[in-house]
Image (spheres, helix red, strand yellow):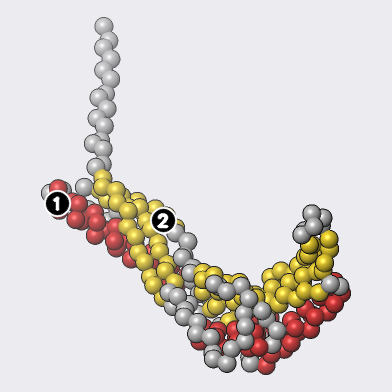
Amino acid sequence: MQEWYMPIQRSKPAVKTITVTGQGTIITKPDTVIITLGVRTEHKNVHEALAENAKRANAMIHALKAIGVREENIDTASFSIYPKYDYSNGNAALIGYEVEHIFDITVKDPKSVGNIYDTAVQNGANIARHIQFRLANEQPYYQQALSLAVKNAKEKAIVIARTLGLPLHDIPIQVTEESVAPSIPRTPSSIATLAASKAVTPIQTQDIIITATVQAVFPY
């Protein structure tokens, strides 16, 4: 009589792990500023409103070029024509038109923003929308933040292991990048319509905060 024996499969013990989240943050100053401003004109006749708007917008652009702003850094963000109505008598009576031309102006020198604002206002601009502080190249700063995030995850794992008396291996078996978009400060203007001023407008640049997050798994 033949007997059959099945080999015993011994399963490997499961690897025990500690999973932590690490975060790294880099704070830096912006090297690029995008100013959004423009020209608003009103007139009973739409052609007059357009002509006045074009005249003031061209004067503004010419003045900005004269102080060093390149033409390729002046872009139209929006151009609109709005009819204006009088509803005082219960009827909609057309009383004129409003033309609005909004520009995005890219500034490579944050220190010159105040002068650019003043020059624009003195030469036709009467709308300020917002300021965007940015970095021309965010990648090197994000890589620094990512490196800090990995170190932070390792430090957390070591603290947990020491507290629990576990023999931690400080090389993770898995690292997952959980990318976080850079925080770009955006300062809305508190005044919709600007008036010319003799003093240079003080513009305070805001710090840019770049954050990276990783999840790391350490065996013990």
Indicate the quadrant where residue 3 lies: top left
| Lateral position of residue 106 relative to residue 45, left or right | left
* Amino acid at pointer 2: Glu
| Lateral position of residue 162 relative to residue 51, left or right | left
* Amino acid at pointer 1: Thr
Q: Position of residue 102 (x, y in %)?
A: 69, 73
| Lateral position of residue 169 relative to residue 55, left or right | left
Residue in the image at 32% along x and 53% along y: 21
How many other residues sit within 10 Å of disc 1, few (<14), some (14-19) or many (≥20)?
A: few
Relative depth, front residue between 83 and 33: 83
* Quadrant including the N terminus: top left
Q: Position of residue 101 (x, y in %)?
A: 73, 73
Indicate the quadrant where residue 107 lies: bottom right
Question: Which type of secondary structure does the marked residue at label 1 adopt?
Answer: helix
Contact? badges 2 and 1 (CB < 8 Å): no
Q: Position of residue 91 (x, y in %)?
A: 82, 55
Give whichever of discs 2 and 1 has the lower sequence position: 1
Relative depth, front residue between 88 and 126: 88
| Lateral position of residue 217 relative to residue 116, left or right | left
- Label 1: which residue? 163
- Label 2: which residue? 177
Relative depth, front residue between 64 and 106: 64
Question: Which type of secondary structure does the marked residue at label 2 adopt?
Answer: strand
Give above or below for 143 relative to 68: above
